[in-house]
Image (tube, rainbow, N blue to C red):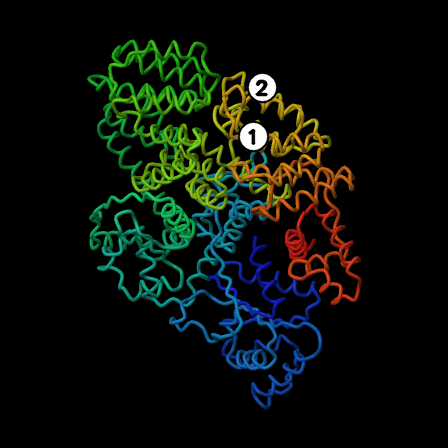
Amino acid sequence: MFEEETRRALDYVSRGVSVRIVGGPGSGKSTVLQSIAAGLEKAGVTVYSLSGSRLLNETPFAGIGALGLEGRGQENGPLGVANVLAERLARRGSRALVVDDIDELDKESAAVIDIVQGRTQRPLVMTMDDAPLYSGASVFMPARWPEATIRLSPLHYDQVNKLLAQTLGSPPDVDLTTAVLMKSGGSPGLVVRIAQSAELSKQLILHGGQWRMGGHTLWNEYLQSTVQELLHGLSADERTALHTLSVVGARPLGSLKPVVEADILDRLEMRGLVALTEDSGGAIWVSVSPHIIVDHFRDPHMRSSRRVLADRSNREIDSHDPPVKSSSPELLAELIGDLRSEAGGGTAATQHFQEQLRELEESQFSVWGSEKTMSNAAAFLKFYWGGPIDPSRIEQVFSETETAGADSGDHFFFAMTRALWAIVSGGEASAATGILQAIGQAHPDWSAEAQAFALYLQASFDRMPLNLDETLDRLRSRHPESGVLPVIRGILELYRFDAQAALRALDSADGFDLAAGMEPFVRGLALHIAGHGEEAMIFSLSQRAAARRRLDQFGFVASSYVAVLAMTQQGLSKEADYVMTGVFAFGRPGFLVSFLHDALLRIAGLRVLASSGKNVPSLGIQARKDAADIGPLPGTGKAVYELVTGKYADPAEFDEKAADLLEQQLDRGYITEAVYASLFMLSLYPGHKILETTQRLLQENGVNTHAQFLAIAGAIRDRDHQLLKILLDQYEVDFDLPAITRLLKGVVKGHLLKRHRGLAKTFHQIISTFENRFPPDGVLLTLDTGGHPQGLTPREREIAILAGSQRTPEIAALLGISPRTVENHISRALAKTGTTTRQSLYAHARNSQTSGG
């Protein structure tokens, strides 16, 4: 879980820099320290390890006793012990001090470490709590120079998912990952404890190879001691305040003044037990963090009466809603800055969003329950177009809503939603078509919209209808203000890769009354497919932020999907990960966007697969298994993901299957999906069939923006290294750079696994020059052909690490060997690892050393 932090720490220590690992309880800092100590010992460093203890921090020399000094020098106090330890550290060879929980160390041991490290200048690696410096929580606050601080951030969705899979032995489903993320606040220790206790208490069910929740809660008796550990050291007033906050839930800061004193709230925030979140109106909301503490205080077995406390608190709290400000950032830099802030904000904001969604659903369902009119039903069902669906509630609304005297527009929306539910819940398409025909007959003024929506369902869940243009042109809307026809025409044009026609359809609309939620998605996707990448990013990120402010999960997920496609094409892969993490943290959404949610899981799954290999379950397996193989938009069908994640002893098999899949997509009329899939699969393997199909597909649709990529793929297919060198030397940066880099990486690996050493070396020399111009961003996905590069010998690994910062003559002089021998070792190491530059070889060797490879 902490490979990057461990690698950075080892790199600092190798340069003589001390390291401070900072994190809260359960953040994983002790685990990181153990990995660092193991890495140092593996590199030949003598490590002196000790740790602080809350129970022994008043016992003199308790910490230093772990070093086995046998009491020597203690009669002379810390100076005497320091002399003994300093003598050991001053001996020849690499040595380092490692101290876990240094802020819990007894004063005498802390003094010894301070004196010895200052005298010997040996690197000191320590962990400590993230409490603010002015809190007085720390006994020992060393000021070392040089020193680097590594702060452990809460885990994101994909990291929690990976840790759960490792802990439980099988991957979790979406809802379990989301629930554990929210309950744990992203704390690794709590993630593990919650998972283990849930399995022990039989709250989890292993179904279809995935763990899922058997009920609606993960709270159990085994977690009481865990929470007590988190609350250790709190005063009675602080516990009461935390209990109050747990009972009343998230509240604006100003409204809490009658029940929680400001200084107590301040102390709780220092301890990391409450989180502050700013909403769209600028108001600061306070909530308990991690949320498992709320479960503890809401446990019915708690001795104090939460009902009495809740009544008293709610009477005193002024819960007036704060004024809402409207501001929409327009510059991409600001939007990406906001995105990074959101990603670094932990789970508090997400928890707040989820609670508000639940309250919104409850209030709207309550309104419908008190008066089961069609207008109230339509208002409730609009929530389910994005929010998580309760099947029993939606069925109740469909069966019990009164139709007499209903507004025809509300009735049409009701029927449209019912038809969509008929398909989403596994029913036959004929049932959905029958519902739409009935509403068209009962309300002829909405018959055009009903026919258009039937076309949309057929196109989305089966194939593009025949004579689509003629059918759409015949439809005459009597409600142009609804925007239904232009939006449906727009999205169908996108299915067949005509972005300009989609934009024309949207621009011809008289309004978007009923289709207001769909229009931004269609427009953003059209901008992206039309090649206006930056405009698509700005638009979709703006719409995403606005949807989050108005609790519109449909708009949030839909705009996130467009943003991820645009950002990935623009090379902003890390920012795309932020967007996807934000979507996954909310859990599975409702209706149509559930298919986009699945698509994002598959996209993220391929990225995780690239960095982790197949020993760690990919996020893609969380996507629903009952999805169609072929979908109308990138990722909405499961076939591409399953094809790419398969194993191929012969890449020609991948070429055959990929070409067949592209033909199936084209047969359904899903040209956009075929274009994106062909370019992606071509970047993994430039087989004859994939390349020919891609060239034909792009030519037939008038696309000429991928000429450089296609030419490079052709040269690789023909093994024409002379042409490849010319093309790479003349390459001008375009949107295909990530695909080209992925393709080149796969070429070297493929030749290595086939033992084509000479060919691999030739291509490697050409490609390394290209990578020096355009360094690859992170680990790249390559086709799994079942083989693995050979491991490095100890000497090759040693030289590989030195090659990251030193020239060949310097390495030769240091090791006492000839420069030619050094170059031979580097050449063999490059061939074995599939890397193409000295820097990428260094990174590979360092990561292998850290992970035990």
Crowd class of label 1 (few under 14; some 14 to 19; many from 20; radius 10 Å):
few
Residue tagged 1: 707
Where residue 42 appears, as percent x and y from the top left, is 70, 63
Q: Tell me the kind of residue under disc 2.
A: Glu
Q: Nearer the viewer, residue 328 or 9?
A: 328
Q: Is residue 776 left or right of residue 332?
A: right
Q: Secondary structure at mark 2?
A: helix
Q: Nearer the viewer, residue 167 or 830?
A: 830
Residue sitting at the far bottom: 76
Image point (74%, 67%), residue name:
814
Q: Nearer the viewer, residue 81 or 478?
A: 478
Crowd class of label 2 (few under 14; some 14 to 19; many from 20; radius 10 Å):
some
Q: Tell me the kind of residue under disc 1.
A: Ala
Q: CA distance from mark 2 to mark 1?
A: 22 Å
Where residue 350 appears, as percent x and y from the top left, is 38, 46
Using the rendered view, name the quadrant where residue 293 is placed.
bottom left
Checking the image for residue 663, the label placed there is 2
Using the rendered view, name the quadrant where residue 116 is placed.
bottom right
Camera-side mark, 2 or 1? 1
Where residue 409 appears, as percent x and y from the top left, is 25, 20
